């Protein structure tokens, strides 16, 4: 009887905490969106329902953190393929005025992105992406200072559940975090 009560208590605890078999660091619902892809198509939150996905926020003419972030996302895509893990990758541009679909496509191609599960998004104004980043991902974004084109933004990768809940963030600039992402995806799928 004692073991049964422990099992019931643990089940209730896991259900109340989202029930994820990994340590979570966040619990934010992604706001509804429908944006333009690198192929001039659209991708919406609804399109991602049912899929685990990793999101980040970058821009193509970034001269600092986006370089290792995008390189790490490319490595993550390769690791997902090697491990047979089905997950989507979504890179939101924080410089939508410059980052047209064509610019994003060339940028993705320069990292050998496989667009079948890695989508680059634009097609919104700066305020829209700033609000989505801050409200849904708790990811800082600030306009480029006067005289520069370098937008300030956070450097995290975010794990999003099939229900559209951001449940964990990882360093996007530290390649060691990629193994943790892979292990977490193995546990939740």
Image (cartoon, rainbow, N blue to C red):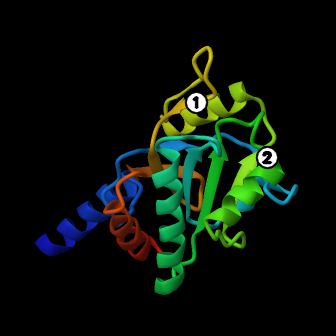
Residue 18's mark? none
Residue of label 1: 150
Residue 80: horizontal and vertical position, in percent?
50, 77
Taking the spot 48% from the left edge, 69% from the top edge, the residue there is 76
Indicate left or right for 67 with 99 as reference: left
Residue 153 picture location, percent across and down: 51, 34
Return the residue found at the far top: 146
User: Which residue is identified by label 2?
Assistant: 34
Residue 45 appears in view: no
- The residue closer to the viewer here, 5 or 120, is 120
Q: In which quarter of the view is residue 126 placed?
A: top right
Asked if one can make out residue 134 in the rendered structure from this viewpoint, the answer is: yes
The correct choice, above or below, for 14 with respect to 138 in the image is below
Residue 155, position as x, y percentages in the image: 45, 43
Frontmost residue, 177 versus 26: 177
Residue lying farthest right?
40
> Badge 2: how crowded within 10 Å, few (<14), some, or many (20+)?
some
When asked about the image quadrant of residue 99, the answer is top right
Pointers 1 and 2 in contact (CB under 8 A)? no
Q: The residue tagged with tag 1: helix, strand or loop?
A: loop
Residue at 54% x, 66% y: name it: 74
Tag 2 secondary structure: strand
Q: Is residue 144 above or below residue 47?
A: above
- Residue name at image x 19 percent, y 67 percent: 5
Instruction: Give coordinates of residue 112: x percent, y percent.
Output: 64, 71
Q: Is residue 98 left or right of residue 90?
A: right
Camera-side residue of 187 and 100: 100
Q: Relative to residue 23, is residue 71 drawn left or right?
A: right
Question: Does 27 sit left or right of 53 as displayed?
Answer: left
Q: CA distance from mark 1 to mark 2?
A: 25 Å
The residue positioned 81% from the left and 41% from the top of the image is 123
Q: Nearer the viewer, mark 1 or mark 2?
A: 1
């Amino acid at each position: 009887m004692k073991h049964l009560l422990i099992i019931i208590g643990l089940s209730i605890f896991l259900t109340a905490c989202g029930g994820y078999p990994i340590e979570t660091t966040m619990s934010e619902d992604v706001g509804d969106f429908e944006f333009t892809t690198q192929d001039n198509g659209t991708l919406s939150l609804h399109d991602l329902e049912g899929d685990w996905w990793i999101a980040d926020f970058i821009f193509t003419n970034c001269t600092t953190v986006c370089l290792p972030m995008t390189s790490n996302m490319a490595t993550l895509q390769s690791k997902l393929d090697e491990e047979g893990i089905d997950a989507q990758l979504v890179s939101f541009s924080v410089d939508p005025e410059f980052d047209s679909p064509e610019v994003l496509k060339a940028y993705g191609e320069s990292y050998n992105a496989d667009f079948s599960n890695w989508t680059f998004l634009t097609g919104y104004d700066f305020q829209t992406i700033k609000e989505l980043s801050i409200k849904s991902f708790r990811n800082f974004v600030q306009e480029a200072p006067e005289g520069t084109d370098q937008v300030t933004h956070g450097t995290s990768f975010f794990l999003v559940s099939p229900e559209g809940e951001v449940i964990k963030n990882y360093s996007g600039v530290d390649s060691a975090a990629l193994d943790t992402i892979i292990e977490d995806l193995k546990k939740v799928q």
